[in-house]
Amino acid sequence: MKHKLLLLTMLFAAFLAAACQPAAEALPTTSPTPTEDLVALAANFTPIPTIALATATTPPTDIPTITVAPIQATDTPLPPTDMPTRVTSMPSETPLPTNTPVLEQVDHYWLSRPIAQEEGLVHWLDRTYPYGGTQFGTREVHLGVEFVNQRFTPVYAAGDGTVLFAGEDSAIQFGPERDYYGNVVVIEHSQLSPEGLPLYTLYAHLQDIRVQAGQPILAGERVGRVGDTGIAVGPHLHFEVRVGDVYDYHSTR
C-alpha cells in the first residue's frame, strides 16, 4: 500500500513539474500531397478543342524578271566614221540699192492742227457733234470733226504732201452726194497708214481756196479760210482723215 502511495506521489510530482514547464514549439509538419485527388482530377479532365489557325500564305507576285544576256565580244572591227566634208560657199553678188522713192510707213498720223493756236481762235474740237456722233439721233453719223470759228479764219495744211483736189464738189463727189462740202481741198500726204495705204486729209465748207491741184504743200501752209459753203450750218471747218480710197465717204479714221 505504501508502495502505491509513493508511486502516485511521484507521478503527481512529475505531472506538476511538467505542467510548470513552457509549452514546446510545435515543429512544422509536411502534409502529404493528396495524390489520389490529383489522379482523380486527371482522370476526369476533358481536353478543350483547339482551332487550327490558317498559316499566312505569301501571294504570288507577277513581277517579271529580266535576264541580262552577256554581251559577246567580237573581233570584228567597226567601220570607220565618215568625216564631214567642209563646203566652201562662194559669195554671191549683192545687188545695189535702187533710187526708187517710196512713201514712209508709220504707225501714227503725225498731223498738225489745221487752225492756228492763237488767242481768239478755236483750235480744239467741237464737243457737240464729235466724230461718230449723231447729236442724240437728230443727225446722221458724223465722219469728221468740227473747228467752229468765225468766217475768214485761216485754215492750214495738217501735213506735207500734194494737193489732190481744190475746188467745189459740185462736179466731183467726196461726200454722200455732190455739193455736200462746197469749197473743199484734199491733200495726199507723203506718209502711209499703218496698213500701207495712202493717207489723205480733207478741208470742207471753206469760204475761199488758196491752193490748186497738183501743188506740193508743207504742213502749216495756208489752204483757204473758214466759211459755210455746201450744207454747213454756220461757219466752221469740217476736217477729215481718209485712208485708202479718197472718194469713199466711209473711209475716214
Image (tube, rainbow, N blue to C red):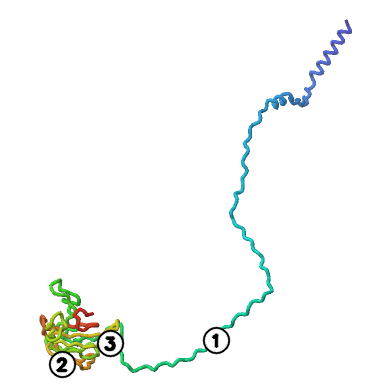
The mark lying in front, picked from 2 and 3, is 3
Rounded to the nearest whole Å, what is the CA distance between mark 3 and mark 1?
Answer: 49 Å
Q: In the picture provided, is 72 more to the left or to the right than 176?
A: right
First in sequence: mark 2 vs mark 3: 3
- Amino acid under disc 3: Gln
Q: Residues within 10 Å of mark 3 (few under 14, many from 20)?
A: many
Q: Nearer the viewer, mark 3 or mark 1?
A: 1
| Of callouts 3 and 1, the N-terminal one | 1
Q: Quadrant of the C terminus?
A: bottom left
Q: Is residue 226 visible?
A: no
Question: Where in the figure is residue 200, as x and y percent of width and height?
Answer: 23, 85
Residue 142 at least partly seen: yes
Helix, strand or loop at mark 2: loop
Q: CA distance from mark 1 to mark 2?
A: 71 Å
In the image, farthest residue toward the top: 1
The residue under label 3 is 191
Q: Residue at x 68, y 72 (%)?
A: 74
| Residue toward you, 143 or 155 | 143
Quarter assignment of residue 121: bottom left
Q: Which mark is residue 210?
A: 2
Q: Earlier in the sequence, mark 1 or mark 2?
A: 1
SS for callout 1: loop
Residue 111: image x %, image y %? 25, 85
Q: Nearer the viewer, mark 1 or mark 2?
A: 1
Residue where numbered disc 1 is placed = 86
Tell me what residue is drawn at x 21 percent, y 85 percent.
201
